[in-house]
Image (cartoon, rainbow, N blue to C red):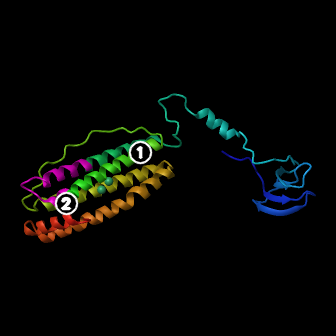
Amino acid sequence: MLLRAPSAAISVSNSRGENLVPLFSASSSSSSSILRLSPVRNGGGLIVSASKGANTRPLTGVVFEPFEEVKKELSLIPTAPQVSLARQKYSDACEAAINEQINVEYNVSYVYHSMFAYFDRDNVALKGLAKFFKESSEEERDHAEKLMEYQNKRGGRVTLESMIKPLCEYDNEQKGDALYAMELALSLEKLTNEKLLHLHKVAEENGDVQLTEFVESEYLGEQVEAIKKISEYVAQLRRVGKGHGVWHFDQMLLHEGA
Ligand SMILES: [Fe+2]
Ligand SMILES: [Fe+2]
């Protein structure tokens, strides 16, 4: 809402109309307006008044007027119960891109959950990796949920798509299961990063500053951190080989943060 005050200057005047203090001034203009502190009728106090050129109509306080812009907004507020009241400058493309990202996060969460189930098996028993992938799965689900909340905040509609069936077996003759799963995790994090950058691009193309800020502050930094961490895990697993070294790596993950 706008306060109609096309003033070029605001000042304080005493009861004799003398200009005491110029409070602030805007750009110089031939149609200068002045907000004044004037004496209250029959009293010695000061009141605020605004003037534009010859208009010296006093104001007894801040007055919000129903401007044309507000009238237009009022007429645009939807009345149908199925339609969001909050939605403003939120494009269909941004809404669709958010739903797409929700699907990406859920799919990655599903794969990590499958890895948790694999490493938690009694005949695999790499408890550190099971713990790591369980926490990673929960983290990706949280990412999806945060996007859902954002979608609702902007007045979009959350639409969930189907998820792809993940692998159930992660053993790999050449790499071993731990390295194979960690390399897969790294590729998924990089794919997620690409999708986030796409979401950011859609927001930019549609002039949605709030969405670009949301993606930057809540996702992009964390995503780069995740890629760095998992890259290090891949490098370490390549060093230790498939046997005893994997057990030590797993112990390190198991006691991390404990
Ligand atoms: Fe994520
Ligand atoms: Fe992630």
Rendered-image quadrant of the N terminus = top right
Looking at this view, name the residue that lies furthest to the top: 80
Classify residue 11 by image quadrant.
bottom right
Does the magenta-highlighted stretch encompass residue 129? Answer: yes
The residue under label 2 is 182
Q: Quick check: is 48 in the magenta stretch? A: no
Q: Is residue 68 left or right of residue 161?
A: right
Occupied quadrant, residue 191: bottom left
Q: Position of residue 234 (x, y in %)?
A: 20, 65
Amino acid type indicated by mark 1: Glu
Q: Determine if residue 39 is in view.
A: yes
- x then y, percent, for residue 219: 38, 56
Which residue sits at x=66%, y=40%? 69
Q: Which residue is mark 1?
A: 149
Q: CA distance from mark 1 to mark 2?
A: 30 Å
**Location of the C terminus (image quadrant):** bottom left
Question: How many neighbours does mark 2 have within 10 angstroms: few (below 14), some (14-19), or many (20 or more)?
Answer: many
- Image spot of residue 251 (x, y percent): 16, 66
Q: Give, as a single range, the part of the protein colored magenta.
A: 109-130
